[in-house]
Every structure is written in structure tokens, then in C-alpha cells.
Amino acid sequence: MTEHLLLGQTLQFTGDALADWQAATRHHSAGAVLIRDGRIRDVGPAESLRAVHPDATVTDYGDALICAGFVDAHMHYPQTAMIASWGKRLIDWLNTYTFPEEAKFSDPTYADMIAGRTLDLALAHGTTTLTSFCTIHPASVNAWFQAAAARGMAVVGGKTCMDRNAPDNLRDTAQTAYDDSKVLLDRWHGQGRATYAITPRFSPTSTPDQMSALGALWAEHPDCLMQTHLSEQVDEIAWVRDLYPDARDYLDTYEAHGLLGARGLYGHAIHLEPREVDRLAEVGAAVIHCPTSNTFIGSGLFDMMGLARAGLRIGLATDTGGGSSFSMLRVMAATYEIGQLRGTPLHPAQLMWLATEGAARALHMGGQIGHLGAGAMADLCVIDLASTPAIAQRHACADDIWEALFPTIMMGDDRAIRDVWVAGRRVAAG
Ligand SMILES: [Zn+2]
């Protein structure tokens, strides 16, 4: 039985850092993480863990920071090849860039290539779990879960369903959306580290019939997740109002069709009505903040602290390729910047919590992933806190771990990711 002991600084969370970051954080400047059989078995001071586990294989990361691998709670792997496409707002951006690219996923070979490329890019940025929309093509879902299984990664995914307001070659029907999703769900959900998410893209691209069919499928498989988009742009909300004249608000287009629940993941959620906030909180649903996407597509400023106070689960995400980076460090920086614009800047501990524990809780995987503590899967990220000259010179005069970490949050990228472990296996080295 091989035990690995990783030495470095360690950052743990023992509670909700959005509510009280000081009570929720534990930092060891000379810490250690013990790994056995793919899981974290202990975290504590290096001296005591070395004494108790003298035969463990030691990897010494010096003063690099060992933390849980990042969890990206909303992205679109089929958009990897068209990330950073210039100059459109949501609806035009979908029609001009996204749909032509997603049409290519009728080719399983292309889907395999982009799925593997996306996961390798994510790992290089310290992200060990991703929640992705696939395309309308079942092969895109198979490609996603197969590529993740080959890398030992816990991922979430689902067939994106659209039966209107999309090109002919990207439309299914209410019935085929149900049938295809059910086959994929039966094949993949709970296989290894795979989790299936029933995936209507968003209300404008699904008829009420398709929404009802997917709501029925979720009712039959309530342990699955459900992912979609909610209230991203003002124009989009007006369009939803035209398409669903009887709905009380955008959320009601989901709620009326069985698509509101605790295991629901609602991406963006920027322009919410009070009733929508209350209902999301009542059912325990999660909203996913995608700040690099929100600024890139010009969507608006998410109310992080207001929604946290209302009791919503909140995760962070890249929303690749609406988001303009694969890096959760960049996502944390944008979260900070949007917080500043709203007058509620977040502490570095809160940013790290959201990108790991918060996102994992949104996926109902708290304690299993995104967590540096005994019992969690050993999905880890090792961060070099002085990865570039600009960061290093600021880091050199830091007085505590938060001052030492914040320059990397604001200025760091994949050069800051020194190493990555997935299920107790080292997968990358900088
Ligand atoms: Zn999205």
C-alpha cells in the first residue's frame, strides 16, 4: 500500500467562507497532505505527519501552496476552439460563433479531440472537475465522459437539448431530447466519476413540450443534476417573456415544467426578480457565477453577496468559450473586480472557497471534491506563489498567506500551477 506525503503550505476550509472566512480557514505554513488509495487521509503539520508515516513517498513542494483542485461549475467544452471570439452580444454571439462550431460535433472524431484538449487545458490550469454542456449530438457526451475517464477526472455533462431557435442541424425534438438523454444518462450517470446533468440549453431554444419532457426525465432520475442558463442578458429576458407569455418570470419557465430543484444549476443569474431569488433559495438550487463571461459578453454584474445572504448555493465557473479564459485564477480575479464594482469586494479566502468548496457544494459533491480534508478524493492543485517576476516581487513583501496569495489570484495563470493530482495520481508537473 503506497502512501504519498506532499509537503508545502496547505490551505483548508472547515466551513462557509462566504459567511465567515476567518472561522472557515486553516493554514499551515509547513503543512502536509497524506494520500492513500486515491483519497486524502490526513492534512496537518508536516512534522507530525512525517513522524506518523515514515514510509510514505515524499514530494516536497517547498513553500508552494497545496489546495484542492479547482472546480469549474459551468462551461461548454465544444466551444474550446472558438474561445475569445470578438464582438457580439449573447444572441448574435451564439448564432455567429457558437452554433457553427457546435455543428462540427456531429463528427465523433472531432468531439474526441476537443474533449481531450479541453480537459488537458483545464488540468494545466489546476482545474480537476468541470461541468460541461455538450452539444445536441450524443457522441459529444460519450466523448466527454470517455476523455474524463481516461484521465481519472470527476466531470459532469449532458446532451444540450434545443428544439427551436437554433439551426436545423442543431435541433432535436421533445421526444428525441428525452430519449437520447435517457440513453446517455443510463450509460454514464454514476459510472466511475461521471455525473449526468439533464441539459436544456435555455428557455429560448426549448419549446414548452421539450421543457416538460426533460422535467419528466428529471423526475424519473432525481439523483441527476440539471443544468441550464438563467437571466444572463436583458435582451434575452425580454425574448423569454415573448416566448412564454404566461410565465411569471424567467425562472418560472423552468419551474412550470419541472425544471426547478435542489440539484438544479442555473448559470449566470444576473438580473433576477425578488420572486426568483426567493424560489431558488427555498428549493436549495445553485446559481453559477461566470464573471469572465459576464464581462466579455457584456451581460452585467452578479450580486454575489446579496445572493449569498439570501441563502443560495453559489459556484464559480469559466463559461468557456463565453468566458475568455480556462483559468479559475482569472475567474477569481474577475469575481473580485465585479465585487468591487458592486461595492462588495471579496476576501482572497472567499475567492478560493468559491472556486473549490463552493463550486463542489453547488454540484452536491461537497466533501468529495474541491476539499482538502480527510475522506475527499485526492484531486489537488499545487500553486507556485511566485510564478512570474511581477508576482514574485509582490509576493516577496507579503506579510501573511492572504497577501502572499492575492497577487497570484489577480495576476496568475497556468504558469502558477506547479503540479496537479487527480484521484491520488500526479498528472502534471510544471
Ligand atoms: Zn453557458
Image (cartoon, rainbow, N blue to C red):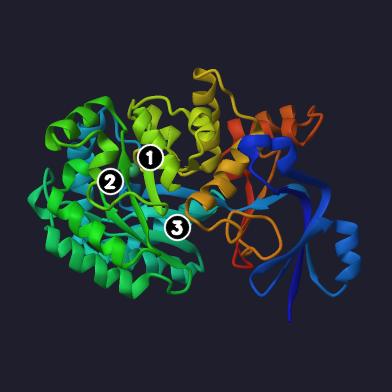
Amino acid at the residue labelled 1? Arg
Tell me the crowding category of disc 3: few under 14, some 14 to 19, or many 20 or more residues within 10 angstroms, Cα based.
many
**Mark 2 or mark 3: whose residue is earlier in sequence:** 3
Camera-side mark, 2 or 3 = 2
Amino acid at the residue labelled 2? Glu
Q: Is 39 located above or below residue 206 in the figure?
A: below
**Mark 3 or mark 1: whose residue is earlier in sequence:** 3
Amino acid at the residue labelled 3? Leu
Q: Which residue is mark 3?
A: 119
SS under mark 2? helix
Q: Nearer the viewer, residue 179 or 111?
A: 179
Q: Which residue is mark 2?
A: 255
Residue 128 x/y as whole percent: 53, 56
Contact between labelled residues 1 and 2, with CB atoms less than 8 Å apart: yes
The quarter of the picture showing ligand 1: top left
Q: Which mark is residue 279?
A: 1
- Which quadrant holds residue 96? top left
Q: CA distance from mark 3 to mark 1?
A: 34 Å
- Which quadrant holds residue 189? bottom left
